[in-house]
């Protein structure tokens, strides 16, 4: 499309910039028109797609699918509370989750984007709206950044740059993946910004701002920033080889070295956070190894089309008009041959790299991810749109190029017609967009022959924008609807969460004891409603936390990275859970309405947060069952562990009358019920889900217990699946631990101190998993790495110390700080040298 008549675009080869020659104030704001238009158009289309799918905040239906509801929403709720000073922990330690977790690592993984600060502008009961605004802001910023980059790569009509910026921001990757994983959207923003850093390095400009942009990208989300950096390296390589103002080999090498300097300094500046996250991943609960299996090429081709959704193939949709423009590039003789060859080769090679295991591993830093294997696809979408811009920046491609591009567009569409990813809306939406784009092309060609017809270019741009907008709206709507029907979802935040949060706030007595909010719909309950429970879902969930809790009868999801609460009196005593909430829904939990429930609060005496285990512990049951491990940690024999007799689907045991029957079968899926009692459901699905132990009822006076099983599939039971809890023994153990435990406990941020009875010997045990980073001391001794006692933090006692203190420091913070300091020095040196060079 020809540029607007009042604007003249001039490229400055010396500085590698593009300027528009205007008079007056227009010159100042010309560079902002395309980014602003792209951002506004993107925000409007995202909201329109949300409205068409009847999704919150423009409809009643939840958008909290998969991890959006179980991770990112709760984390943003906690982030808001943290920023406003309403949490017990600090930036190092989160006391709410997993009985104490590495919060700095979670900040670097989920919350370090500057956009996430927006949550403080919203009230606590509007956290869903806050997260939607954060998501929309990131997507809109990505559109603006891409539009800005396009005009810096080559001069051209700013309205077309705005439309292509929108196409990038609302690609299939964004609608299918990024919108429900908001932390990845920072990579979407980072890619065009890092390409801009490459342009500055290539032309020897902005040596200080460049590293700062790199640092910001890696701080915001280093995982996708890594992919964006690789993509920007591809763009820089093509620009060094093909740019019209490219100099000799020496100058090209100098540009590459300047870019490497910017990247290294920027990553160094981000090291205080990146190193902490990296080391936290090393001790995180390992997920099963994944072997990469390339998607069928029919499915890959189908994903270029609208209204397609899948987690098993790359989301390559950028809009039919934008894709058609990109496909004209190899045949557009108005573009220099080296430029056509360079960008075409880059796009083809990156496309092939998605399907080859060695390059797949390179894109994902050496580890094939679980879940979505094509997380780097946004880079290819960006390359396609850069190709589209180079083909259209100097006017509409000539008919031969348009026909060749249309043929390239039609062939894969025909080949992909049988793909399982094709939706009933795919071809109607694509066809309608293609017709509108064709009309836009005809108007633009007519405008080129009639220079006096100023209205024709405007109509052409409007048709192009309309084609892109309509297709995006349909695609966004269909992807939302398909996700809700095919994957797990969490309900909207509503009265259930509000009631639970109010009860937790009323009952909270930290650090005298913990308050567990129980099961609230969604995940990471304690981050949403408060308390200090076991529920914790993070990519950085420590292997120690997962193994320790599961060994004690806790359940988990997500292959161990999501431990959940255990409503068991022994576990409450072990972890000082003095107040427990129990919720009962008053109606079925639905997608289109916030849930409601009645919430009850129970408070029981429990030992303090720090207790003392004497040198000679009482003998307990041997074995590796969760019951025996609970007893070893408690230091008392509180269960009867009968050997069950199995007859078909029935277990029979004998237990003390009045004791409570507990059933532990972590891999069992089905129901279990005492004779005449309500069946209790278990949902074990190894290796993803481990079922927690649950109470089945009370032993009758006869002492005879019959458990009827209703398994779904193969019956999987441990050797000791039944434990009968004698409450009087537990009460006695609690009284003893309370009498010998800390007389006073204080918790400040990431530090816990306790006063002990005089003469305490043995081991002081802090009711928190012994994850990496804990350092403890007894009395005035120098803090040392904490010991472990059955998986919990422990401090040896010699009878002389009357106090203990433990402090958590995220591993890697010292190393990261040193690297960051060195990078800051390098940045300062670069700034001084650049200033001296500029003066000369």
Image (cartoon, rainbow, N blue to C red):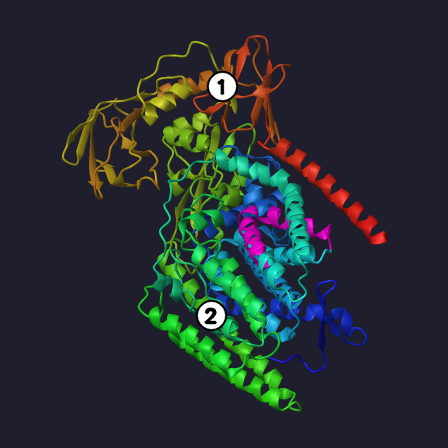
Asked whether 597 or 129 is in front, the reply is 129
The circle on residue 468 is none
Classify 546 as above or below 759. below
Classify 454 as above or below 739. below
Q: Main secondary structure of the magenta part?
A: helix
Asked whether 791 or 456 is in front, the reply is 456
Which image quadrant for residue 684?
Answer: top left
Which image quadrant for residue 672?
Answer: top left
Tell me if label 2 and label 1 are in contact, CB under 8 Å: no
Q: Is residue 428 visible?
A: yes
Q: Residue at x 60, y 55 (%)?
A: 190
Q: Is residue 167 visible?
A: no
Q: Which residues are magenta?
A: 206-235
Q: Quadrant of the N terminus?
A: bottom right
Asked whether 780 or 296 is in front, the reply is 296
Residue 202 image position (x, y, % from top left): 67, 57
Q: Nearer the viewer, mark 2 or mark 1?
A: 2
Classify 126 as above or below 276. below
Q: Earlier in the sequence, mark 2 or mark 1?
A: 2
Residue 758 image position (x, y, % from top left): 57, 10
The residue at which mark 2 appears reads as 52
In this picture, residue 36 sits left or right of residue 550: right
Residue 236 image position (x, y, % from top left): 60, 57
Which image quadrant for residue 457?
Answer: bottom right
The circle on residue 738 is 1
Q: CA distance from mark 2 to mark 1?
A: 58 Å
Secondary structure of the residue carrying tag 2 is helix
């Amino acid at each position: 499309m020809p540029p607007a008549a009042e604007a003249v675009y001039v490229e400055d080869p010396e500085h590698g910039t593009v300027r528009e020659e205007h008079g007056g104030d227009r010159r100042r704001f010309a560079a902002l028109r395309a980014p602003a238009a792209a951002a506004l158009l993107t925000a409007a289309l995202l909201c329109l797609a949300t409205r068409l799918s009847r999704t919150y905040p423009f409809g009643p239906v939840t958008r909290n699918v998969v991890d959006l509801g179980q991770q990112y929403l709760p984390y943003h709720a906690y982030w808001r509370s943290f920023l406003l000073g309403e949490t017990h922990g600090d930036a190092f330690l989160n006391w709410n989750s997993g009985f104490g977790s590495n919060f700095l690592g979670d900040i670097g993984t989920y919350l370090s984007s500057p956009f996430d600060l927006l949550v403080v502008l919203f009230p606590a009961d509007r956290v869903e709206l806050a997260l939607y605004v954060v998501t929309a802001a990131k997507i809109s910023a990505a559109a603006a950044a891409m539009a800005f980059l396009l005009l810096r790569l080559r001069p051209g009509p700013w309205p077309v740059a705005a439309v292509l910026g929108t196409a990038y921001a609302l690609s299939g990757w964004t609608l299918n993946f990024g919108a429900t994983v908001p932390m990845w959207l920072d990579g979407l923003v980072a890619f065009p910004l890092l390409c801009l850093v490459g342009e500055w390095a290539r032309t020897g400009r902005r040596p200080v701002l460049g590293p700062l942009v790199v640092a910001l990208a890696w701080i915001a989300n280093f995982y996708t920033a890594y992919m964006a950096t690789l993509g920007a390296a591809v763009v820089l390589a093509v620009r060094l080889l093909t740019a019209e103002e490219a100099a000799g080999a020496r100058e090209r090498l100098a540009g590459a070295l300047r870019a490497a300097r910017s990247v290294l300094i920027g990553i160094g500046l981000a090291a205080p956070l990146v190193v902490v996250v990296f080391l936290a991943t090393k001790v995180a609960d390992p997920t099963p190894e994944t072997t990469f299996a390339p998607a069928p090429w029919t499915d890959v081709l189908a994903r270029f089309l609208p209204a397609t959704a899948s987690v098993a193939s790359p989301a390559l949709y950028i809009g039919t008009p934008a894709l058609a423009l990109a496909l004209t590039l190899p045949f557009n003789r108005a573009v220099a041959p080296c430029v056509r060859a360079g960008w075409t080769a880059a796009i083809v090679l990156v496309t092939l790299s998605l399907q080859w295991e060695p390059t797949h591993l390179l894109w994902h830093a050496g580890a094939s991810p679980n879940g979505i294997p094509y997380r780097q696809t946004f880079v290819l979408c960006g390359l396609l749109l850069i190709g589209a811009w180079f083909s259209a920046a100097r006017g509409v491609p000539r008919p031969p190029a348009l026909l060749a591009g249309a043929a390239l567009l039609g062939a894969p569409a025909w080949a992909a017609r049988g793909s399982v990813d094709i939706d009933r809306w795919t071809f109607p939406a694509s066809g309608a967009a293609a017709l509108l784009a064709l009309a836009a092309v005809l108007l633009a060609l007519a405008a080129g022959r009639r220079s006096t017809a100023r209205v024709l270019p405007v109509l052409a741009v409007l048709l192009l924008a309309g084609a892109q907008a309509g297709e995006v709206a349909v695609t966004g709507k269909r992807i939302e609807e398909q996700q809700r029907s095919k994957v797990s979802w969490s309900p909207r935040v509503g009265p259930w969460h509000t009631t639970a949060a109010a009860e937790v706030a009323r009952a909270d007595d930290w650090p005298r004891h913990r308050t567990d909010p129980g099961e609230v719909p969604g995940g990471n309950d304690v981050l949403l409603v408060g308390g200090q429970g076991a529920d914790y879902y993070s990519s950085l969930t420590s292997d120690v936390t997962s193994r320790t809790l599961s060994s004690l009868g806790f359940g988990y999801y997500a292959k161990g990275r999501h431990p959940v609460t255990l409503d068991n009196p022994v576990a409450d005593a072990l972890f000082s859970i003095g107040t427990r909430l129990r919720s009962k829904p008053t109606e079925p939990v639905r997608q289109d309405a916030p849930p409601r429930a009645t919430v009850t609060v129970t408070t029981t005496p429990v030992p303090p947060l720090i207790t003392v285990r004497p040198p000679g512990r009482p003998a307990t049951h041997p074995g590796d069952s969760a019951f025996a491990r609970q007893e070893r940690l408690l230091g008392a024999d509180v269960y009867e562990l009968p050997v069950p007799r199995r007859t078909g689907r029935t277990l029979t045991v004998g237990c003390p009358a009045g004791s409570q029957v507990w059933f532990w079968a972590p891999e069992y899926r089905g129901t279990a019920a005492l004779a005449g009692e309500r069946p209790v459901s278990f949902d074990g699905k190894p290796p993803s889900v481990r079922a927690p132990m649950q109470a089945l009822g009370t032993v009758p006076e006869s002492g005879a217990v019959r458990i009827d099983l209703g398994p779904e599939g193969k019956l999987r039971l441990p050797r000791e699946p039944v434990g009968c809890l004698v409450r009087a023994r537990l009460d006695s153990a609690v009284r003893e631990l309370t009498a010998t435990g800390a007389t006073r406990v204080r918790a400040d941020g990431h530090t816990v101190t306790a006063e002990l009875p005089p003469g305490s010997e043995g081991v002081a045990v802090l009711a928190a998993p012994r994850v990496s980073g804990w350092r403890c001391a007894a009395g005035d001794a120098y803090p040392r790495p904490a010991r472990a006692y059955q998986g919990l933090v422990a401090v040896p006692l010699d009878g002389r110390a009357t106090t203990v203190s433990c402090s958590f420091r995220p591993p890697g913070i010292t190393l990261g700080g040193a690297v960051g300091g060195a990078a800051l020095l390098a940045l300062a040196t670069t700034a001084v040298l650049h200033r001296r060079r500029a003066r000369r």
